[in-house]
Image (cartoon, rainbow, N blue to C red):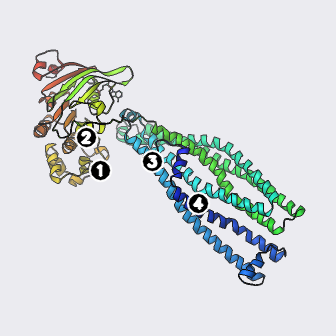
Amino acid sequence: MQSRCSIKGIVKQLLSYRRELIFGNIIAILSALLVVTIPLFIPIIVDELLLKKDHGFITFISTHFFTSDTKGYVLFVLVVILVLRVLSTLLSILQTKIFVSISKNITYRLREAMLRHLKRVSLKEYEMMRVGAVTSKLVTDVETIDGFVSSTISKLIIAVLILIFSAVVLLWIHWQLALFILVTNPVVVLFTVKLSRNIGKLKKEENRAVELFQSALTETLELFHQIRAANKEEYFFEQSEAKARELKEHSVNYGYKSDAAVKFSYLVFLSGYEVFRGVSILAVAYSDLSVGLMLAIFSYLWVMVSPIQDIINFQYVLATAKVACKRINTVFDMEQEPVVVQKKNPFEGIETIGIEVKNLSFSYIQNKPILENINMHIEAGSKVAVVGASGSGKTTLSNILVGFYPLDEGEIFYGGVSNHELKLSTIRENIHLILQHPKLFNDTMLFNLTLGKTYSEEAVHKALQIAQLSEVIENLDSGLETLVGKDGIKLSGGQRQRVAIARMILSDPRVVIFDESTSALDVHTEARLFEALRDFLKKKTVMTIAHRLSTIKSAEYIYVLEDGHVVDCGTPQELLEKDESYFSQML
Ligand SMILES: Nc1ncnc2c1ncn2[C@@H]1O[C@H](COP(=O)(O)OP(=O)(O)OP(=O)(O)O)[C@@H](O)[C@H]1O
């Protein structure tokens, strides 16, 4: 599995398809041989039949096949040429099939590697990520690489082969003329290498413009509801239109300049071609080159046009691929969550666990601590609450407990095992954090509850019952099969929160953290919900973060946070006895 994008890496991957490449190339060689042989026939029969110059070809036909007059020989040669052309086309289709599947496999693997990297990207990176920018790299830049790979394997190799074969035939026909042609051709290629560098830069600008446009559009569409509520469609869509205009300008710039560069390079080649034709006529006049063979040289010059064009194009494709690789690597540069070697799983075979937080400090931005020296002792099976003013760090703490952010200092022990020795996936599998604003997929209600996992009908109904959702589902058009719309738009805030709670019930974690997870419910529904949850949560460690007293009334122990510090803790009774406690002020 590759980890970064580089031309060297792509070539290495190409070589891993050795067998297919060899087979494809054998077919390419056969096809090239046919293409190169065809132009020889007509000039030879012109020499032999019209100019009476003997190359031994007609003699060969009459000795091995049949004897005929001029018409018969011409017809025979025509049939042979047609058969060779059909064969060459069939071989080239087969060759394309082999090469296309190699190139698509390579680009698929690149996308797969990018997606795997993204899967483990740290939350800090994710929060700053512009979704449109990342998707543009996964789509546009990977497509640029696809163009490079397919043109390398399907065109470059065959182009080089045709040139080599043509060179051999030209050397055989007239070596001095052939040398002249073969020495001047690389000059054209060198010239194109220089031009291609600038084209690479233009491609970079174009792809960057695609990225900016895609980012602006994705964000506008994602926040469409809020944009409309703020009556700001004009402003936001104008931003996307401006980016679309910039993209158009860059695309025009790249489109015509890259085409001009290719055409200019081709013009240089064509000028050389005319010179070669002139020199060939001189060779007929001043050496022993026959008119028929001169025509053959003309044909070979034509045969060489397309491969040379492919080699010229390759310079541009290579330059754009290098740029695309650089942009793709910005995805691979995104920081990932740490990989932990897990020796012991404290959650295994146990109903719940206790959590010990020791001297925990954390900051989003260096030297701006959000949490400082936090110490907590949460007994297995206990029910604790965390209260504190807005911005005191409660959500940050709950996010750290489920491993969303790495700690700067301190340690967390889950059932006695340090966070340094536990995989983040193990923590999240067993500790379920229910957010205040749960995200729903634009899918069915059932999918939003199960997230693709299979549960029995009974388990789903039980979860719905506890989460106070049974009635809600009954009232939906298609029950559990109802589509909830973008971000669950068809549901109320409180219903969305209850879907998240039902999701938690189904996943049956060892520890549950409620972070303002019932804030949108009226106190009566909330009370019914917690009553129904009581049995389910009985043997689990539960942490509840809330501003409302009703939400934390069953807490056995309370931590009070203020500006990132635990300023108070104790049983509700102990805290109530202190007048100045934040908790007592909640009453
Ligand atoms: N992703 C983030 N990047 C940078 N700073 C953040 C981030 N999330 C929160 N903060 C900052 O951290 C501080 C604590 O925020 P946090 O959400 O943890 O507080 P809270 O106590 O849960 O607040 P509330 O009760 O309003 O939900 C705030 O000053 C906030 O601006």
For badge 3, the amino acid type reads Arg
- Residue positioned most to the right: 286
Q: Earlier in the sequence, mark 4 or mark 3?
A: 4
The x, y position of residue 356, in whole percent, is 21, 26
- Can you tell which of label 1 and label 2 is closer to the viewer? 2
Residue 353 in which image quadrant: top left
**Badge number at residue 443:** 1
Q: Position of residue 35 (x, y in %)?
A: 67, 66
Asked which secondary structure carries label 4, the reply is: helix
For the C terminus, which image quadrant? Answer: top left
Give the residue number, with chain letter if any, for mark 2: 429
Specify the amino acid type for callout 1: Asp
Alpha carbon distance from label 2 to label 3: 27 Å
Query: SS class of the residue under badge 2?
Result: helix
SS class of the residue under badge 3?
A: helix
Residue type highlighted by circle 4: Asn
Q: Specify whether residue 247 is in view.
A: no
Marks 1, 4: nearer the viewer: 4
